[in-house]
Image (tube, rainbow, N blue to C red):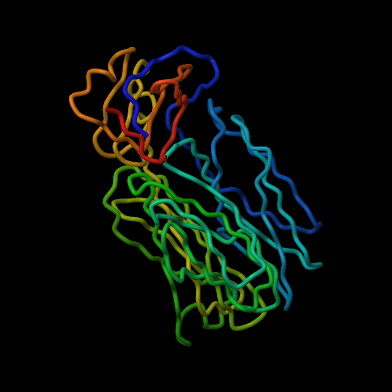
Amino acid sequence: MNFRFLILLITIAFGYDRVKAEQQIEKSVTLENDKLIQDITFSEPFLETPVIYITLTKLSMEGQKYGFEIDVAEVNQKGFKIIYKKYIENPITLQIQWLAIFDPRVEVAYYTSFKQQLIVPVYEDNFAYSIIGVQGSSNQVGIQVEKIDNGNAYLQVTNSVKMIKLCIISGSKHALYPKFIPFSVSNNHPWMKEQKGKAFISFSYDLNVDNPILIGGITEFLFKNSSIKIQLQNLKYDDKVLAEIGTWNDAQLIQAQVSILAYIIDEDLILSDKNCVELFEQCYFQGQTIKICKEGDGQNLATEFKFKSFIVPRFKQFELVLNKDVQQLMGIESCIDEIILK
């Protein structure tokens, strides 16, 4: 679309905060009943409702059949609810980590699948995920990325799984740094030896970023017997990413995979200029940018300008006018069809 001049109008229809994030590892919960509801309150309220990325960091259950599910509900600026459900008689112990984000560069979605293949849209082919629900009767649970094509990730689910639920986060490569780490062990590995206590191994990898917020989750596991006990713990950043993964009480973990996500917050991204509209050449607020601060600024462009993302200041709206065609822009859009100003 081509637009020749622009008008900036004051409005009270939309408001938003600067980029903000908060994360927390919750205490383990053991489900004796079918459902448990946990109320989460943010340390400081968000001015806008955030998205919630949750991961499974600990799972402990016994028996040939298993079934559990974790839901996020009633998300608002002050907090949200976590709903734990189990579908078997035996107790299940779960632990989760959550990351609340208000950032237009990031999307979060929840998917439940009863099929062996799951196709999900991902932004910039840059994403991480965690299992947050599963039903089945095998000691192997997992999901692998088959391919990424045209903005979609094709995920293959273990054949023995009847239902799997995932939480998926995707977004700008300037905001999210995901990594999937597989583990496969031999008979002399600590996970396979007889051990009544815990058997954990440490792992690390380099990450050249400043002050990342880390969150990790379980994406796959295979046990030699019907006792399923796995935990990702002590995730931290100290010049590199450090964590531990393991099992306990002779559970005999053979194979596992975890996803680690580093999120980089840009606190100056949203309100970098409270009085001007900012137009960005590329999605996710990248590339060349121009500012429109008053009516008529758009008419003074020396050359045409193409943009695919924009930020309109809080309490304002932006109108693009061509003849009788008027398009209103409000708030924040991280990736739109290209618009041309000329």
Extreme-bottom residue of the structure: 187
- Residue 34's spot in the image, x, y percent? 80, 57
Q: Residue at x 53, y 44 (%)?
A: 24
Left or right: residue 294 versus residue 140 is: left
Report whether residue 318 is seen: no
- Residue 69's spot in the image, x, y percent? 69, 58
Of 138 and 333, which appears nearest the observer?
333
Of 327 and 262, which appears nearest the observer?
327
Of 313 and 297, which appears nearest the observer?
297
Q: Residue at x 45, y 26 (%)?
A: 327
Above/below status of 33 relative to 46:
below
Of 319 and 18, which appears nearest the observer?
319
- Residue 123's spot in the image, x, y percent? 43, 51
Q: Which quarter of the picture shows residue 203?
A: bottom left
Left or right: residue 288 versus residue 16 is: left
Report whether residue 315 is seen: yes
Q: Which quarter of the picture shows residue 111?
A: bottom right
Q: Quadrant of the C terminus?
A: top left
- Residue 260's spot in the image, x, y percent? 43, 57
Q: Quadrant of the N terminus?
A: top left
Left or right: residue 315 versus residue 294 is: right
Extreme-front residue of the structure: 323
Q: Residue at x 46, y 68 (%)?
A: 145
Q: Residue at x 48, y 17 (%)?
A: 315
Above/below status of 181 relative to 172:
below
